[in-house]
């Protein structure tokens, strides 16, 4: 997942004025041991964050005031467009210095200050993006139709488009209403995410209620005042219980608690946000928020998305029904006539795969210690893309566990950028896996390149006294996928910050990383990323590699249906004026999941972070982009996943452009033709 971070304004986010230089100087004095070229500050105090936030807003305001003051008959690229482009390039990292700590800081005071900073920046962002005086000046320049480079023309077109999508070409009354709605939506989304980050519910079970869990897992649990074992709802506890606990009532209790997270606070927030999104879209001339949001993506229309999702669902139904019948039979044999529910899905899929493919997942994990996986993953990416990674010694980071790497081009020696790895859970940290853009790669006002900087956040099990952190195969896939986003950001060669790396259309952004998940299903790359934790020279045995490759299509029907449920729910709520999320889920779940009902008393939308993290009316993009990822892989890499020639072509034609071209153009240039669904359907066993 790509985390959508706040930026100061829809057209700009940076400072050219004296205030910005003062702020930068202050920060450099505070953090003198930073790596060369990195402007983002990672260890600010709560006071520093709020002070910097106010300075960012003041500086950006002065720049926009200067642009707005240009007489309409004197507009030029240099006095209108260049200041806005330079602005976005320079201040993006300062904004991230303020808003990123909400996801990673160990200090609640800092996290709260960061969330407050994001609220202030978002509120300013809305006001700034609604400035008719700036829009008028930019439009006057655009109307002159001066010859520009393709990227500069694209920048001007996007600035105009973004202004007009907020109604700046409409009446003042509409603009005021849009501004109010957009500000309120931003504040509510921050509150939604903050509630998720702070969630820390624990459940207690006896050892017999956790039967089936590995001894190492049980050993690491703490006991409550009654002597029972405590589990939380974060990934390192949730997934092992759902996959391995033999006690159905325990799985059900944990699943219900998981899908009840933040219900008391976030259901109300989400339903308010959905109503406001649709109200804003209608003010701007669209029928609903889905139509508004999808208009600037690859799909272009909700009808096309709906047709796509329903078409895939129809094709998957026979396969999903067959898979479900098999799992239901397994449950009857083990647990009697207890109805099959969502809490059974992961457990019986795991059992079925272990029986069919003769794979014990606990044994598989022993071959994937985190340090070995990391070393192998980095080697594969370096060889494939023609890069070199070097760990930074004594980096300035937000937590002692975080690692920093510098990236250079193998052939030229050019410094390409930096990335951070923050891989273990802790209280207050973002609870899923994502990549955050901390600094965009682009050309600065002096003609030099600003280096891109990215951070990958994950929640892999921490090492214990007896064993290192061991990853399940699915976690290896997650790692490989998220790191693909890191490389997309680092390898981008856009001239403008607006087009750097991950700022491609939202229904394409997952495709490059989804394609790279295939490396986790190939024997050659699996051996590079594996080594038994007791003897790292023993890679994953060939029979297990083959079993994991065969497993790729196992239960593809049900797992795809689960993605379809999320995508259809997202589309449904964003096509209505008012929603009852629980009622929609209760109706939609059994229809999509071939009769499996929603767990009673739950509402997973309360912790569906995508709805507050920039994926609203966009969740369909995971499956949409998977179609393209399958086509890219089968066309270029199927016969040799370690092909350096194909890897370099992928870097140059897919990653390097960033958002300088439409995704449809990028795909056609890489494939040499229009993409098709055939490879995707074959990958699902159809």
Image: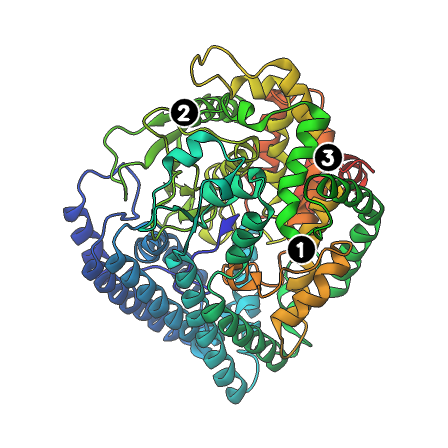
Residue lying furthest bottom: 173
* Residue under pointer 3: 554
Q: Is residue 563 left or right of residue 475?
A: right
Where residue 32 appears, x then y in whole percent?
A: 17, 41
Q: Is residue 614 above or below residue 183?
A: above
The tag on residue 371 is: 2
The kind of secondary structure element at disc 1 is loop
Q: Residues within 10 Å of mark 1 (few under 14, many from 20)?
A: many
Quadrant where the image shows the C terminus: top right
* Residue under pointer 1: 620
The tag on residue 51 is: none
Residue 148 appears in the picture as rendered: no
Where residue 7 appears, x then y in whole percent?
A: 41, 60
Q: Is residue 121 left or right of residue 233?
A: left
Between the C-alphas of marks 3 and 2, the distance is 29 Å
Q: Is residue 633 above or below residue 532?
A: below
Q: Is residue 539 above or below residue 292?
A: above
């Amino acid at each position: 997942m790509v985390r959508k971070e706040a930026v100061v304004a829809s057209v700009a986010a940076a400072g050219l004025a004296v205030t910005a230089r003062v702020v930068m100087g202050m920060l450099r004095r505070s953090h003198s041991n930073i790596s060369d070229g990195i402007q983002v500050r990672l260890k600010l105090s709560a006071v520093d964050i709020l002070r910097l936030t106010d300075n960012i807003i003041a500086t950006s305001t002065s720049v926009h005031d200067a642009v707005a003051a240009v007489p309409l008959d004197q507009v030029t690229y240099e006095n209108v467009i260049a200041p806005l482009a330079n602005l976005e390039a320079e201040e993006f990292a300062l904004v991230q210095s303020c808003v990123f700590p909400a996801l990673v800081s160990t200090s609640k005071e800092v996290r709260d200050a960061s969330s407050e900073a994001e609220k202030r920046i978002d509120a300013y962002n809305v006001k700034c993006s609604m400035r008719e005086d700036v829009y008028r000046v930019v439009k006057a320049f655009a109307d002159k139709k001066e010859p520009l480079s393709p990227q500069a023309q694209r920048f001007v077109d996007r600035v105009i488009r973004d202004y007009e999508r907020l109604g700046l070409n409409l009446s003042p009354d509409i603009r005021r209403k849009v501004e109010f709605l957009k500000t309120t939506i931003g504040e509510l989304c921050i509150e939604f995410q903050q509630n998720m980050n702070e969630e820390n519910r624990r459940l207690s079970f006896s050892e017999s209620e956790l039967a089936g869990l590995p001894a190492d897992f049980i050993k690491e649990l703490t006991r409550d005042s009654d002597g029972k074992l405590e589990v939380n709802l974060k990934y390192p506890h949730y997934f092992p219980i759902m996959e391995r606990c033999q006690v159905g009532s325990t799985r059900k209790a944990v699943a219900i608690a998981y899908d009840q997270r933040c219900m008391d606070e976030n259901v109300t927030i989400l339903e308010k946000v959905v109503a406001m999104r649709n109200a804003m879209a209608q003010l701007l001339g669209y029928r609903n928020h889905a139509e508004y949001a999808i208009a600037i993506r690859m799909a272009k229309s909700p009808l096309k998305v709906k047709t796509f999702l329903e078409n895939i669902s129809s094709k998957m139904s026979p396969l999903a029904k067959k898979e479900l019948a098999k799992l239901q039979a397994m449950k009857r044999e083990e647990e009697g006539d207890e109805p099959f529910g969502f809490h059974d899905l992961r457990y019986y899929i795991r059992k079925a795969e272990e029986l069919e493919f003769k794979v014990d997942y606990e044994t598989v994990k022993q071959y994937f210690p985190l340090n070995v996986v990391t070393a192998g993953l980095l080697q594969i990416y370096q060889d494939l893309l023609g890069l070199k990674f070097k760990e930074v010694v004594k980096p300035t980071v937000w937590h002692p566990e975080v690692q920093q790497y510098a990236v250079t081009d193998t052939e030229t020696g050019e410094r390409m950028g930096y990335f951070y790895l923050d891989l273990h859970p802790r209280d207050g940290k973002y609870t899923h896996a994502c990549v955050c853009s901390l600094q965009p790669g682009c050309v600065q006002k002096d003609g030099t390149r600003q280096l891109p900087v990215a951070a990958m956040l994950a929640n892999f099990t921490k090492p214990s006294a007896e064993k290192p952190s061991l990853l399940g195969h699915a976690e290896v896939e997650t790692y490989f996928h998220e790191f693909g986003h890191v490389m997309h950001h680092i390898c981008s060669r856009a001239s403008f910050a607006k087009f750097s790396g991950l700022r491609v259309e939202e229904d394409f952004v997952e495709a490059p990383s989804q394609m790279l998940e295939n490396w986790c299903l190939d024997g050659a790359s699996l051996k590079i990323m594996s080594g038994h934790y007791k003897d790292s020279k023993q890679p994953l045995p060939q029979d297990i590699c083959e079993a994991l490759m065969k497993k790729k299509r196992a239960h593809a029907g049900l797992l795809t249906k689960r993605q379809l449920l999320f995508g259809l729910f997202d589309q449904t709520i964003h096509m209505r004026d008012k929603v009852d999320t629980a009622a929609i889920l209760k109706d939609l779940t059994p229809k999509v999941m071939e009769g499996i009902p929603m767990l009673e008393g739950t509402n997973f939308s309360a912790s569906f972070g995508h709805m507050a993290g920039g994926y609203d009316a966009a969740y369909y993009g995971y499956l949409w982009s998977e179609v393209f990822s399958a086509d890219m892989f089968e066309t270029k890499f199927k016969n040799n996943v370690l092909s350096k020639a194909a890897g370099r072509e992928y870097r140059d034609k897919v990653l390097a452009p960033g958002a300088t071209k439409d995704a449809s153009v990028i795909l056609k240039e890489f494939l040499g033709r229009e993409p098709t669904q055939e490879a995707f359907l074959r990958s699902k066993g159809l």
